[in-house]
Amino acid sequence: MTDRIAPDGGDEFAIFNHLESEVRSYARSFPVVFATARGAQLFARDGTPYLDFLMGCSSLNYGHNPPALKSALIDYISADGITHGLDLYNEAKESLLREFHETILMPRQLDYVVQFPGPTGANAIEAALKLARKITGRANVIAFTNGFHGASLGALSCTGNRYHRAAAGQLLGGVTRLPYDGYLGPSVDTADYLDRLLSDPSSGVDAPAAVIVETVQGEGGLNVAGTEWLCKVAAIARKHGALLIVDDIQAGVGRTDAFFSFEAAGLRPDIVTMAKSISGYGLPMAIVLIDRQLDKWEPGEHNGTFRGNCHAFVTARAALEHFWRTDSFAASVEEKGNLLKSRLEQIAQKYDPSRVSAKGRGMMRGIDLKSGEVASQVVWTAFQKGLIVETAGPRDEVVKCLPPLVIRKDQLGQGLDILENAIDSVIGHTVATAASEVNHDRKRFQ
């Protein structure tokens, strides 16, 4: 308790320990006071560089302080551009909407309207669920095992993680959770199971307002839904009068190669939620994309004070203009995603598949170490060697790599070298310790 009453003590973390809530999490894994950031690197106060494979949990797909976005924001602020606009018409929002329409929606023949629900992904999920229930007049929502959609109550009801759900302190209803693709093994098509339940009037599963799904489950452990499964789920939703909501908050904005993670499957979701890297600069911003025919909101029926963050509009527009007007950026991301895949598979192949395996898609990949304790040790070892990387999965057993999409190939290789050495160090030590214990036990009984 000493550090709680001595905020100006010698410990450089004293003020954080004294005043910041115990709810903080990432800081516990990376105990350094960071001062600056550029591209793929964070710099500690003492100047020590760290490669960042966390990237604000995919909120910084274009890296730290991307020059084109930084310049656009500085110019806008210098010209006394509007900072906060609620949902008033303003030039920053006008420019973003025009760029989004011409660069993203039109080439993909998507007829969506854009809702700005507030600053976070959870705000987008809450709005999407609320709209789906309003349109259909139904209450139930189908969500999937290991899904993560946010920590506010509506979003949390669709989230599978027991630890996060328990923090609500109350029952979270209105959702039926069903197995994600591959959850019951490769021989079970869980989409058929979904259809069977919804087709049977005695299954006990109420007709849903929506089916909400991540094409790649980020927090759930980098589980990847197959194209065939996604298409079947979309068809089943429509067959039973439910809306298809794709949560593209972490997997979108190029993280899985294309701008939207569902493009490869050829999906046309009824509603899409986006946040994290949609602003391009780490500024709070979320959007809900709604099929034009489903925009049934009444004026002011859903709102949020910070739905008009004009600084985020400026950087989001600059990101679309700079990175997405041609196919060259997506091609470079795909190339680096293949390099990441190849390298992680090479690391995994050094070990028994029951202990280590590679998984993920695009530049949203990682190593499943089958143990949260081992994964935690790997993350700590990597941090000590200059790499920031996080864990995911139901038991935090997956080391999840989210390098910036703009990372140089040499930096990507350097980060993966650190990760490989950390895995070798931790697993090699674990194996040596286990062998030592076995030999010790043998001697005891001889």
Image (cartoon, rainbow, N blue to C red):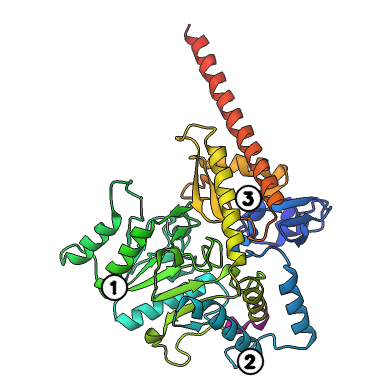
Q: Position of residue 404 (x, y in %)?
A: 64, 59
Viewer-nearest residue: 274 or 138 = 274
Asked whether 349 falls inside the magenta stretch, the response is no
Residue that numbered label 2 is attached to: 90
Chain part drawn in magenta:
306-312
Residue that numbered label 1 is attached to: 238
Select label 1 or label 2 by which is in front.
Answer: 1
Viewer-nearest residue: 82 or 172 = 82
C-beta proximity under 8 Å, tags 2 and 3:
no
* In the depicted structure, whether residue 407 falls above or below residue 292: above
Name the disc covering residue 389, or none.
Answer: 3
Q: Residue at x 56, y 39 (%)?
A: 346
Q: Disc 1 residue type?
A: Arg
Residue 111 at least partly seen: yes
Viewer-nearest residue: 43 or 109 = 109
Q: Quadrant of residue 245?
A: bottom left
Looking at the rendered structure, the secondary structure element under dot 2 is loop
C-beta proximity under 8 Å, tags 1 and 2:
no
Asked whether 309 falls inside the magenta stretch, the response is yes
Q: Residue at x 76, y 61 (%)?
A: 37
Q: Residue at x 50, y 15 (%)?
A: 441
Left or right, 204 with respect to 337, comes to left
Residue 1 at least partly seen: no
Q: Position of residue 323 (x, y in %)?
A: 64, 70
